[in-house]
Image (cartoon, rainbow, N blue to C red):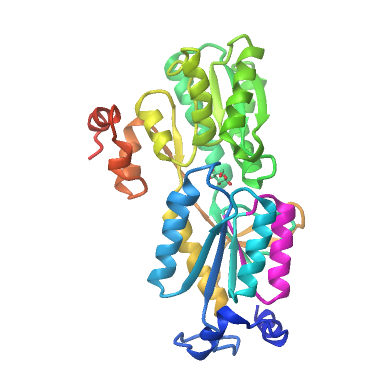
Amino acid sequence: MRKGFLTFAAVGLLATGSMAACGDDSSSNDAGGDAAKKPKIGVILPDSKSSARWETADRRFLKAAFDAAGVESDIQNAQNDKNAFQTIADQMITSGVTTLMIVNLDSGTGKAVLDKAKSQGVATIDYDRLTLGGSAQYYVSFDNEAVGKLQGEGLVKCLTEKGVKNPTVAYLNGSPTDNNATLFKNGYDSVLKPKFESKEYTKGPDQSVPDWDPAQAATIFEQMLTQTGGKIDGVLSANDGLGNAAISVLKKNKLNGKVPVTGQDADVTGLQNILAGDQCMTVYKAVKKEADAAAELAIAVAKGERKETGQTVKDPESGRDVPSVLLEPKAIDKATVKDVVADGYVDKAKLCTGAYAALCTANGIS
Ligand code: BGC
């Protein structure tokens, strides 16, 4: 880290954006002797289609955390464009960010960005998604296998309540390029595989959705339904966007509410689908905690400080133990939608519109 900063100064990259930062150091750091360096954090979010969370939650909470710490930040969204991702990273590095935090679009391009930042003395953090083979100094996320386990358990609960005998379960997995999607699947497989093996359940179609794209998910699910002659009794969908795509197809076939569908992210549509009885559950990840933890680390590393996270995650590609913060996810069903509102994650006014107003009242959402 410290060495990184020396490199940074030595190669003369303290251009434009960070010049002002050099004059005034009000922070009380600093292990590295680079006391003149004022933190400036760059964040690259992945897109705004695969989940509402990136723009409605992550951006908001990260900005609030940086503002509260009085730290300059630049939060941008790559809109699922890998070239744009790299260009944004280059611009941020040139503009003098001291820490770069990324949600990669895939490990290959993520690694290139992290390595470049590192070579220029910029501290790096993997936010939410681990970049396999990457060089980020920290990884901040949720326990993603636990997320998948909650989804598997939630689906089992809903199928049991519906009394479906030997249900056929279809999988709509997340993007094959997202390490989280692998972890979610490990989690739900740990619950469902034993049931397939014991023949209590039947394994239906199992497909990954490129880029977590809900439009492709709808097409894929439509094909699944056709291919099985409508014999799908439960859908393990890896997030709310994919779940909503499946629900839209189920609606066309008048099967919504009959076939339980899972989700993740507790977004407004997911919660509305739960209130309407079309979605079985979602997984709430308190993004504010994730953003706060990441912001704290981003500011600390920018100052050359070392933080103990007390936990590491092994990068399965490089074998490196990456210092990590992993937060606990929470399962949400109809009875607990109100907890997500009470936590300030979703706005009651946005959730309880139109036909949902009565459902909100009936489910104690105030
Ligand atoms: C995140 C999920 C999100 C998905 C699609 C995953 O890496 O952990 O919260 O729904 O990406 O954006």
Question: Residue drawn 35% across and 45% down?
Answer: 346
- What is the quadrant of residue 89 in the picture? bottom right
> Dividing the image into 4 quarters, which one contains the N terminus?
bottom right
Answer with left or right where residue 114 lies relative to residue 214: right
Q: Is residue 177 above or below residue 232?
A: below
* Location of residue 31 in the rendering, given as x and y in whole percent from the top left corner: 57, 85
What range of the chain is rendered magenta?
104-127
Q: Is residue 5 left or right of residue 51?
A: right
Does residue 114 show up magenta in the picture? yes
User: Residue at the spot x=46%, y=57% of the render?
Assistant: 59
Q: Nearer the viewer, residue 324 or 269?
A: 269
Query: As drawn, is 127 to the left or to the right of 67?
Result: right
Please say whether residue 343 is one of the residues in the magenta stretch. Answer: no
User: On the picture, is 38 further left or further right than 273?
Assistant: right
The quarter of the picture where the C terminus appears is top left
Which image quadrant for residue 235? top right
Image coordinates of residue 342 in percent, x first then y, are 29, 46
The answer to whether residue 123 of the structure is visible from this angle is: no
Of residues 278 and 109, the one nearer the viewer is 109
- In the displayed structure, would residue 137 be above or below residue 215? below
Residue positioned 46% across, 85% down in the render: 27
Give the quarter the ligand 1 occupies. Answer: top right
Give the vertical position of 146 relative to 278 (above or below). Answer: below
Q: Give the image location of residue 23, x and y in percent.
A: 51, 90
Q: Nearer the viewer, residue 335 or 358?
A: 358
Q: Position of residue 41 (x, y in %)?
A: 53, 70
